[in-house]
Amino acid sequence: MKCYDRGMIDELTKEFHKREHSGFEELLKTLKKNPETLHFELEKEYFFLLNQSVFQELLQLHEDRKDFDHVFESFSSFGKERLLERYLVDEVLSTNEIEGIASSKEEIFRSLRHEAEGDQHIVSSINVYKILMERKVSSPKDHKSLRKLYDLLIGNTLKKEEEPDGTYYRRDPVYLTDGLKSVHTGIYPEEKIIACMEEIFTLNKREDLDIFERILLSHFLFETIHPYYDGNGRLGRFLMSLSLYEKTHSCSSFLLSSSIRKHKKAYYKAFEKSRKETEQGYLVPYVISMAKLLHEGFREAIEDLRTMRRKIEELPYESSLSKSENTVWKLIREASILSSFGICNEELLKVSSLSLRSISSAVKKLKELGMTEEERIGKYIYRRAVS
C-alpha cells in the first residue's frame, strides 16, 4: 500500500471556505491531475487520492484484522465454531435491522441450524454466507454474475413491483429519503447504470490497491448508483464481506454489518460528507469516516473476544463433580460464554469423547444441582450455565 500524496487535504469543504476562489480551483486542479488520482465517472465525477491520513486509517484496519485473527485463533476448535456461528447470527440480525426487517437471534439461529424455514430474508442471507465460507461464490466480475448473486441473496424476498425490470438492473429511478425528504436519487436508466457499474468492476480488478481501499470505494459507488429497486444496502454490505473474506479468509469479514449497525449515524454521515457540493466529489472524507467506523467495530469485537477467552481460562474445576461431569460442565459453560443459546446433548456428544449415557447422566446431575438452565429451540434442548 503506497501513499503518494503526503498532503493532509482531508476535506475540501474546509479548503472551500478557507481559500480564495482561485486558490481553491488551483488546489482542485492539482488533486485531480495527480497521476495517482482515481477517477470515477458516474452522473458526476468522483475522485480519490490516497493521502497520509487515509494511509494511517487503512494501516490501522490491517492491524485490527491481525489482532482479531490472533485472538480468534487462540480459541479451541469448538470455541471457533461457536464464535463463527455467533458472528453469522449477529451479521444477519444487523443487516436486517439496518433494512428495518424484524427478526430475532432465535429465528436466525434456527435457520442456521436448518430447524426452521423462517423469513425468506433470513434464509437467503444464511444460505449465501454459508456459500461464502465454503468458497462456492466469488466476487462478481460482470453484470451477469452480479445479477446471479443478487437473485440468490435478494430474489425470493422481493415483491413483484420490486423485481429488476431491466436486463440486469432497474429501468426507472429510485429515490432515497431520510423519512422526510429525498436525499439521493439512484442513477438511471439502465444504460447509465450498466456504464457506471463498469467503474466498480474495473476498480475491483486493481490488485495494486489495498483491499480496504477497494471495498470502501466500491461500496460508495455501489450505493450511489443504487442499481436495484430494493436490496441495495443488503447486497452492498455482503459484497464488502465477500471481498474481504476472499482476500484474508478472516472471520473479521463477518463483522462489517454489525459495525455499521452500531454506528449507523456515522455510516450515513460518511456518504453525506463526500456528496456535499463543496467536496466536489472528493472521496477522502468518506473513506476516512468509514475506516474509523470499522476500526471502532473491530476494536469492540477484539475486546469482546479477550473478555470471553479470559472467562473461559478462569473456569474452575469443580471438585464435587466426576471427571466426565466436569468435562460436560466445562463445555456447557464455554458454550454459554460464546453463544446466546448454549449447547445441546447432540453437540456434547460430537465434541467430547463421552458416551451419550455419560452425557445424559452428567446433564441430569448439573440440572439437579441448579447449575444449568435449559430452553427448547426447535427440536433440540439447549443448556446454559446459570449466571
Image (cartoon, rainbow, N blue to C red):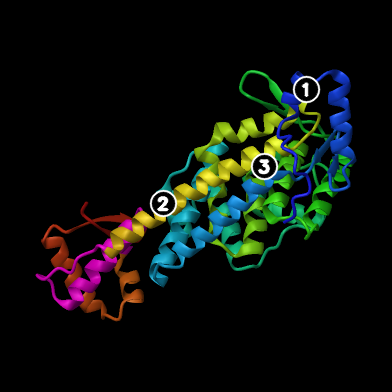
The quadrant holding residue 52 is top right
Q: Which residue is mark 1?
A: 16
Where residue 126 sits in the image (x, y, percent)?
54, 56
Give the label, 2 or 1, closer to the camera.
1
Q: State the CA–CA distance, disc 2 to disc 1.
A: 40 Å
Q: Earlier in the sequence, mark 2 or mark 1?
A: 1
- Residues 322 and 367: in front is 322
Q: State the CA–CA distance, disc 1 to disc 3.
A: 19 Å
**Is residue 209 covered in magenta?**
no
Q: Residues within 10 Å of mark 2 (few under 14, many from 20)?
A: few
SS label for mark 1: helix
SS label for mark 2: helix
Q: State the CA–CA distance, disc 2 to disc 3.
A: 25 Å
Residue 131 visible in the snapshot: no
Indicate whether 174 appears above or below 71: above
Which numbered circle lies on residue 383?
A: none
Q: The magenta stretch spans which residues?
A: 314-343
At x 75%, y 39%, the residue is 7
Q: Amino acid at mark 1?
A: Phe
Q: Which residue is mark 2?
A: 303
